[in-house]
Image: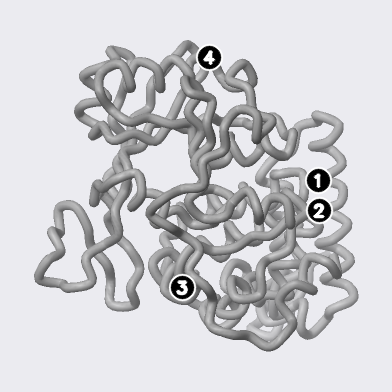
């Protein structure tokens, strides 16, 4: 766990800009990716969109994971085609989402997610079309349907390691943000100004932890620095979205290191305030109980055994129960036999 944090304990300077308008292009001889490794359906979507005159690439986690010799769970496509244009090309396509409009293309049980290139949000409220883009007073993005170019899309990605675009037709990788460099150096680095990017979407703080724990990477120091002060912003995220993010955090097979990082970066408190208070007042019992449950959860996942959210939340919430029972008894509730 020490190496996950050692990269962001030193004094900070202003973060450097890590995106560029002209990408580093890696030809097939300069990377290990092969089109046969990717979902044939995803490759087919890229080919059909390109043949229809659109730009299209495999992007994000599937490219990152392949470079790390990890089998991806999902395959995502980014394209210059709008959701409506994608749907017109594929009869098995369905547009989903309002905050972030996407297209799901169904091939039996496999679903390929297709997203239109996104652009930066207008900083001037007068330029902002509420039907496409909106923010709240703290800067959090409420709607994100401002379409743009490939270069703008790279700037809108959250982390450098997710801003890699693979063209299975030419077998080239486009790297706009030094993502290959950060993969080689095992670093999670935000694109752009970390404080602004976290304010746009506070869930990015949880994603930084999830990727760091999953990939055994460190969080780059400038990307980690604002997290503790901005952690309370998670309280404004809708409960349904936080529930999904918590499942991703703790059902990835890396729940134990994830818990340690969440506590260290003060992200556990806005997610589980009562259990965080128990961790403060009864640290040994609380830490041992949660850690043992999460270690067991990780083991079951590695053994391909079922894990239920009910058990997970019971373990995460149980430490807060004794204090609640004591307060209830002080108000007159009979002792539990």
Q: Earlier in the sequence, mark 3 or mark 4?
A: 4
Residue pointed to by mark 4: 40
| Circles 1 and 4 in contact, beta carbons < 8 Å | no
Residue 328 visible (yes or no): yes
Instruction: Name the spot of residue 59 as percent of width and height, x first.
Output: 49, 37
Q: Earlier in the sequence, mark 1 or mark 3?
A: 3
Q: Residue 294 bears which disc, if any?
A: 2
Q: Nearer the viewer, mark 1 or mark 4?
A: 4
Residue 235 visible (yes or no): no
| Circles 4 and 2 in contact, beta carbons < 8 Å | no
C-alpha span from label 1 to label 2: 5 Å
Relative to the observer, which residue lies in front, 92 or 155?
Answer: 155
Residue pointed to by mark 3: 193
Residue pointed to by mark 1: 297
Q: Nearer the viewer, mark 2 or mark 3?
A: 3
Q: Secondary structure at mark 1?
A: helix
| Left or right: 320, with 96 as reference point | right
C-alpha span from label 1 to label 4: 33 Å
Please state, as top left, top right, bottom left or bottom right, where the C terminus lies in the image.
Answer: bottom right
Please state, as top left, top right, bottom left or bottom right, where the N terminus lies in the image.
Answer: bottom right
C-alpha span from label 3 to label 4: 37 Å
C-alpha span from label 1 to label 3: 35 Å
Q: Secondary structure at mark 4?
A: helix
Q: Residue at x 59, y 63 (%)?
A: 189
Q: Residue at x 76, y 83 (%)?
A: 280
Q: Residue at x 88, y 57 (%)?
A: 292
């Amino acid at each position: 766990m020490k190496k996950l944090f050692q990269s962001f304990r030193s004094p900070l300077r202003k973060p450097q800009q890590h995106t560029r308008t002209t990408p580093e292009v890696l030809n097939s001889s300069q990377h290990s990716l092969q089109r046969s490794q990717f979902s044939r359906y995803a490759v087919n979507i890229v080919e059909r969109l390109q043949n229809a005159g659109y730009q299209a690439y495999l992007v994000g986690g599937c490219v990152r994971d392949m470079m790390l010799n990890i089998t991806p769970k999902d395959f995502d496509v980014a394209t210059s085609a709008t959701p409506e244009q994608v749907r017109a090309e594929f009869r098995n396509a369905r547009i989903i989402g309002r905050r972030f409009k996407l297209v799901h293309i169904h091939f039996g049980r496999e679903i390929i997610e297709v997203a239109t290139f996104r652009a930066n949000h207008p900083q001037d409220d007068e330029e902002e079309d509420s039907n496409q883009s909106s923010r709240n007073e703290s800067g959090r993005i409420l709607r994100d349907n401002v379409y743009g170019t490939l270069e703008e899309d790279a700037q809108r990605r959250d982390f450098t390691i997710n801003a890699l675009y693979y063209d299975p037709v030419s077998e080239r990788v486009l790297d706009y943000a030094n993502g290959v460099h950060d993969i080689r150096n095992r670093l999670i680095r935000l694109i752009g100004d970390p404080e602004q990017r976290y304010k746009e979407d506070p869930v990015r703080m949880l994603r930084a932890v999830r990727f760091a724990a999953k990939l055994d990477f460190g969080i780059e120091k400038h990307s980690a620095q604002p997290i503790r002060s901005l952690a309370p912003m998670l309280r404004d995220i809708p409960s349904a979205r936080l529930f999904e993010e918590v499942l991703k955090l703790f059902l990835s097979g890396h729940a134990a290191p994830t818990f340690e990082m969440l506590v260290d970066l003060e992200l556990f408190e806005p997610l589980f305030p009562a259990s965080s208070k128990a961790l403060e007042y009864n640290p040994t019992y609380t830490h041992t109980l949660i850690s043992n449950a999460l270690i067991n959860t990780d083991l079951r996942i590695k053994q391909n055994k079922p894990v239920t959210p009910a058990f997970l939340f019971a373990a995460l919430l149980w430490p807060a129960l004794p204090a609640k029972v004591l307060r209830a008894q002080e108000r007159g509730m009979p002792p539990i036999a």
